C-alpha cells in the first residue's frame, strides 16, 4: 500500500527549508513546487507537521487529481470520488478553490462545481448529504486547478499554520510567524542557541522574532496553543495517535525549560508597539522569558551578563513612502553602529525590502537570501560583527547604483502584467522563429522608459534618459521599481538581470567601458554563433533591431565580395560568410570591437585569408583612392550618428556627411552591386542629391521585426545601386 501524499504550503522562498524540516517529521520529499513542497509519509508525519512545523502554512492530504479542461469534466472527476470516507453525512464542509482556466474563470464558480460534485456523490442513491458551511466547517476540501488538472485534498491544518494563537494585535509592519521562523533558521539561531548564544532584536516591533526565537530555544511546538485543526472531524482522523502526539508536545515543553534558557531581549523606541509586544508575550506564555526595553536604537545597551556570542535579527523599516526613504540610511547606519558597539563577534541578520541600504550598516554581508514579505520582494542579509567585515557606510539614496525596490505596488503590478502579456505574444513569436535574443519591452508604458531585451536566459535592461521635465528622484524610484518587478514577472534570477542607464553618447563615449566583468557568452542567430557581453559596454555587441538585415545578407551573399563599414563586432560579416560570401573586409576604428569581430569570425570558422578585419578610420579609408582589389558586390554601411574621436581625421555628423559617405562607398561597389545603408538618427533625412544620383529604395519598414514594431524608427535603411542597373524588386523584402 502506497504512503499518503501531502502538499505542504509555505511562504515563497522558504520551500527548501520546509523540505528539510518535513524530513525531520518522517516525510520524504517528492518534489518542490512554488510556495510549497510535495512529500509522502505516514499520517503521523502529517500530524507532526500541523503541530510542529515552524514554516508551513497548510498541510493538504492528497485525495486525487482529475481532468478539468471544462466545468463538466471537472464535475465528473469530483462526483466519482469516494467522499464518504472523508466527510460525515451529518457533518459539514467547504471548498477552498484556487486557479482558473478558459472554462472556469473565477474561484467562486470553481468552488461551486466541486461542491456540486461532492454533494451529488452523497445523494446519488437517494442518500443524505452533508451541509455546506462557510465559516466553521468540519472538513475543508482543497481544490487547486492548474493547466487542465484539478488537484483535490483534505486540509488537515484547517487554517494557516502561521497563526500560532499568540498574536491578536500587531505592529505597523508585522512579520508572519512562519516567515520570522524562516529568518531565524537562515540566520543560524538553532546552532547559536545550541552553542550557548543569546538573542536580541533592537527594533522588535510587536515581538514576533522574539517569540519565535524563544519557541525554538525552549522546544515549544508552534501549534501547542492552537484551538483546533482541520483533521479533528475528518473521518480518517486517528484520535489515539493525535493524543499521543499532544502528550509528547507537553513533555518536550516541560523539558525545554529545564536546561539553559538563553537571554532573549527586544528593544524599540515606540511605547505603543512595545505594549502590543507585551500582550503577545503573555498570550504565548513567554513574558517571563523575554525582556522588553523602551530605548532608541542609537542608545542601545546590553545590561547584565550576556553570552560572548549570539545573534541579532531585526526587520528595519523599508521606507515604503519616498519621504520615509530619506531617513533609512541614518537608521541602517545607527543599527550598524549599535551592533558594533554592544554585540562584537555576534552574527547580525537584517531582513529588508530595501536591501540597498545594507550598505549603510558599515559591514560586508557574507550571505544574502531572497525571500518575500507577503508580495514584497525582500532579502535577508547576514553579517559577522567584527573588524574583518567592516566597511565604510554608504547612502544608496545618493547618486550611484540603483537597486530593486517597489514603492508603488499598483504601478508595479501594471508593469508586471505588461511584461507577462509581452512574454505570451512576443516571446511566443520568438520561440516559433527560433529566436533567443529579442526585445521584449520598449517603453510600452510612459512610467517605465526602458528597453528590456532577452538574451537566452539573461535580461538586459536599458533606461532611456529622462526628459528634463521628469524629476530625477522619481525616475530613480521607477527604475528601482522595475528592477524589483522584472525578475519576478519573467521568472529569472536577479543575478541574471543587467541594467544600464542609457544616456546620450557622443564621440568615443559610446565605446567606453561601463564595467570590467569580462563576462562574454555565446548566442545563436540563424545558425551563426556570436559573442555578447551584457555588462561591460553600453551596447552588448549585437544590435537586435538589425536581425532581419543580417538574415537577408546571409541569404543573398553567396559568391559575393562583402564590405562591412563601421563593422562594430562583425555580426553582419559573420552572416555574410555563413551565406557563402567569397571574401569579406570588415573595418572599424575601435580596436576593442575589431578584436571582438575577429573572435566572432573565428567562432564561425571563417578563413582569415579570405575574410579580413582591420582597425582603421572608415572616414579616412573611404576618402582614399580605391585600390584595384577594393571592389565589392555587397556593402553594408551603418555609421554612428555622431563621432569626434581623436582617432579620426575629422568629425562625423551623419546628417551632414552621409551624402559624401555614400558617394565614396559607391566608388567601391561593382556595377551590379548593392549598398545597404542604415543609420539610427531619428530625424534623419536622405539628401535629395543622393536620390537623384543613384537608384535608391527605402526598405526601412521591411527590416523591422515583430519585437521592434512599437519603435519602427529605431533605424532607417535604404538599398542604393548604380543608376544604370535595373532595380531588382526582390533585392530586399521581409514578408
Image (spheres, rainbow, N blue to C red):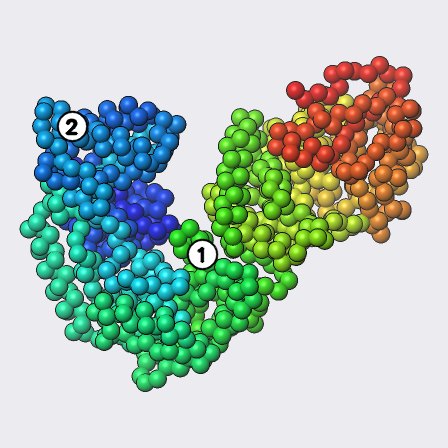
Is there a contact, CB below 8 Å, between mark 2 and mark 1?
Answer: no
**Residue 143, x across and y down, in percent:** 27, 37
Residue 233 lies left or right of residue 25; in this view the side is left
Disc number placed over residue 121 in the picture, else none: 2
Disc number placed over residue 138 in the picture, else none: none
Disc number placed over residue 378 in the picture, else none: 1
Residue 693 appears anywhere in the view = yes
Mark 1 surroundings: few (<14), some (14-19) or many (≥20) residues within 10 A: many
Question: Going 34% across and 61% down the picture, which residue do you hit?
Answer: 180
**Residue 608, x across and y down, in percent:** 73, 34
Mark 2 surroundings: few (<14), some (14-19) or many (≥20) residues within 10 A: many
Question: Going 74% across and 16% down the picture, which residue do you hit?
Answer: 730
Question: Going 35% across and 46% down the picture, which residue do you hit?
Answer: 35
**How far apart are labels 2 and 1 at the CA level?**
46 Å
Label 1 secondary element: strand
In which quadrant will I find the C terminus?
Answer: top right
Residue 135 to residue 398: above or below: above
Amino acid at each position: 500500500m502506497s504512503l499518503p501524499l501531502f502538499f505542504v504550503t509555505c511562504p515563497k522562498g522558504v520551500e527548501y527549508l520546509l523540505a528539510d524540516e518535513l524530513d525531520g517529521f518522517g516525510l520524504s520529499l517528492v518534489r518542490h513546487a512554488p510556495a510549497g513542497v510535495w512529500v509522502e509519509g505516514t499520517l503521523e508525519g502529517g500530524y507532526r507537521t500541523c503541530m510542529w512545523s515552524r514554516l508551513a502554512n497548510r498541510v493538504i492530504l492528497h485525495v486525487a487529481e482529475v481532468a478539468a479542461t471544462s466545468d463538466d469534466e471537472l464535475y465528473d472527476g469530483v462526483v466519482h470520488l469516494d467522499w464518504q470516507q472523508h466527510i460525515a453525512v451529518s457533518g459539514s464542509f467547504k471548498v477552498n478553490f484556487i486557479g482558473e482556466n478558459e472554462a472556469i474563470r473565477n474561484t467562486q464558480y470553481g468552488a461551486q462545481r466541486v461542491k456540486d460534485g461532492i454533494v451529488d456523490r452523497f445523494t446519488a442513491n437517494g442518500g443524505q448529504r452533508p451541509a455546506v458551511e462557510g465559516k466553521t466547517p468540519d472538513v475543508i476540501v482543497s481544490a487547486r486547478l492548474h493547466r487542465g488538472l484539478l488537484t483535490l485534498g483534505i486540509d488537515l491544518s484547517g487554517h494557516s499554520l502561521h497563526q500560532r494563537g499568540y498574536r491578536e494585535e500587531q505592529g505597523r509592519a508585522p512579520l508572519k510567524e512562519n516567515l520570522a521562523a524562516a529568518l531565524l533558521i537562515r540566520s543560524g539561531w538553532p546552532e547559536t542557541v545550541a552553542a550557548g548564544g543569546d538573542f536580541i532584536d533592537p527594533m522588535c516591533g510587536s515581538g514576533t522574532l522574539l517569540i519565535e526565537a524563544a519557541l525554538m530555544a525552549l522546544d515549544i511546538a508552534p501549534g501547542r496553543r492552537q484551538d483546533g485543526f482541520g483533521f479533528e472531524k475528518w473521518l480518517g482522523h486517528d484520535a489515539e495517535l493525535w493524543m499521543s502526539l499532544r502528550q509528547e508536545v507537553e513533555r518536550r515543553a516541560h523539558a525545554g525549560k529545564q536546561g539553559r534558557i538563553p537571554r532573549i531581549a527586544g528593544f524599540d523606541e515606540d511605547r505603543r508597539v512595545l505594549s502590543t509586544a507585551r500582550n503577545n508575550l503573555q498570550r504565548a506564555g513567554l513574558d517571563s522569558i523575554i525582556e522588553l526595553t523602551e530605548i532608541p536604537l542609537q542608545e542601545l545597551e546590553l545590561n547584565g551578563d550576556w553570552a560572548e556570542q549570539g545573534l541579532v535579527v531585526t526587520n528595519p523599516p523599508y521606507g515604503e513612502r519616498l519621504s520615509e526613504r530619506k531617513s533609512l540610511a541614518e537608521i541602517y547606519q545607527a543599527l550598524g553602529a549599535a551592533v558594533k558597539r554592544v554585540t562584537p563577534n555576534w552574527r547580525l541578520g537584517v531582513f529588508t525590502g530595501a536591501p540597498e541600504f545594507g550598505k549603510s550598516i558599515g559591514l560586508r554581508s557574507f550571505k544574502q537570501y531572497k525571500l518575500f514579505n507577503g508580495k514584497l520582494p525582500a532579502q535577508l542579509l547576514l553579517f559577522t560583527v567584527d573588524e574583518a567585515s567592516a566597511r565604510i557606510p554608504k547612502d544608496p539614496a545618493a547618486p550611484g547604483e540603483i537597486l530593486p525596490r517597489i514603492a508603488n505596488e499598483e504601478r508595479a503590478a501594471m508593469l508586471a502584467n505588461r511584461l507577462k502579456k509581452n512574454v505570451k505574444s512576443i516571446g511566443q513569436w520568438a520561440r516559433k522563429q527560433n529566436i533567443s535574443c529579442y526585445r521584449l519591452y520598449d517603453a510600452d508604458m510612459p512610467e517605465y522608459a526602458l528597453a528590456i531585451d532577452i538574451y537566452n536566459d539573461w535580461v538586459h535592461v536599458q533606461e532611456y534618459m529622462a526628459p528634463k521635465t521628469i524629476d530625477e528622484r522619481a525616475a530613480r524610484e521607477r527604475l528601482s521599481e522595475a528592477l524589483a518587478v522584472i525578475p519576478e514577472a519573467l521568472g529569472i534570477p536577479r543575478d541574471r538581470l543587467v541594467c544600464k542607464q542609457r544616456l546620450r553618447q557622443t564621440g568615443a563615449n559610446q565605446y567606453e567601458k561601463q564595467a570590467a566583468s569580462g563576462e562574454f557568452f555565446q548566442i545563436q542567430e540563424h545558425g551563426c554563433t556570436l559573442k555578447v557581453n551584457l555588462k561591460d559596454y553600453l551596447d552588448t555587441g549585437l544590435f537586435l533591431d538589425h536581425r532581419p538585415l543580417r538574415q537577408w545578407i546571409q541569404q543573398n551573399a553567396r559568391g559575393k565580395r562583402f564590405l562591412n563599414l563601421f563593422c562594430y563586432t562583425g555580426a553582419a560579416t559573420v552572416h555574410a560568410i555563413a551565406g557563402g560570401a567569397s571574401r569579406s573586409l570588415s573595418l572599424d576604428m575601435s580596436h576593442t570591437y575589431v578584436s571582438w569581430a575577429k573572435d566572432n569570425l573565428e567562432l564561425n570558422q571563417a578563413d582569415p585569408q579570405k575574410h579580413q578585419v582591420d582597425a582603421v578610420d572608415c572616414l579616412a579609408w573611404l576618402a582614399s583612392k580605391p585600390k584595384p582589389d577594393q571592389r565589392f558586390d555587397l556593402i553594408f554601411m551603418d555609421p554612428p550618428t555622431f563621432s569626434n574621436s581623436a582617432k579620426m581625421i575629422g568629425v562625423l555628423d551623419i546628417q551632414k556627411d552621409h551624402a559624401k559617405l555614400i558617394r565614396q562607398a559607391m566608388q567601391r561597389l561593382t556595377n551590379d552591386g548593392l549598398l545597404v545603408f542604415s543609420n539610427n538618427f531619428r530625424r534623419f533625412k536622405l539628401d535629395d542629391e543622393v536620390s537623384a544620383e543613384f537608384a535608391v529604395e527605402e526598405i526601412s519598414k521591411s527590416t523591422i521585426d515583430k519585437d521592434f514594431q512599437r519603435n519602427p524608427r529605431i533605424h532607417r535603411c535604404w538599398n542604393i545601386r548604380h543608376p544604370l542597373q535595373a532595380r531588382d524588386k526582390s533585392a530586399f523584402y521581409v514578408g
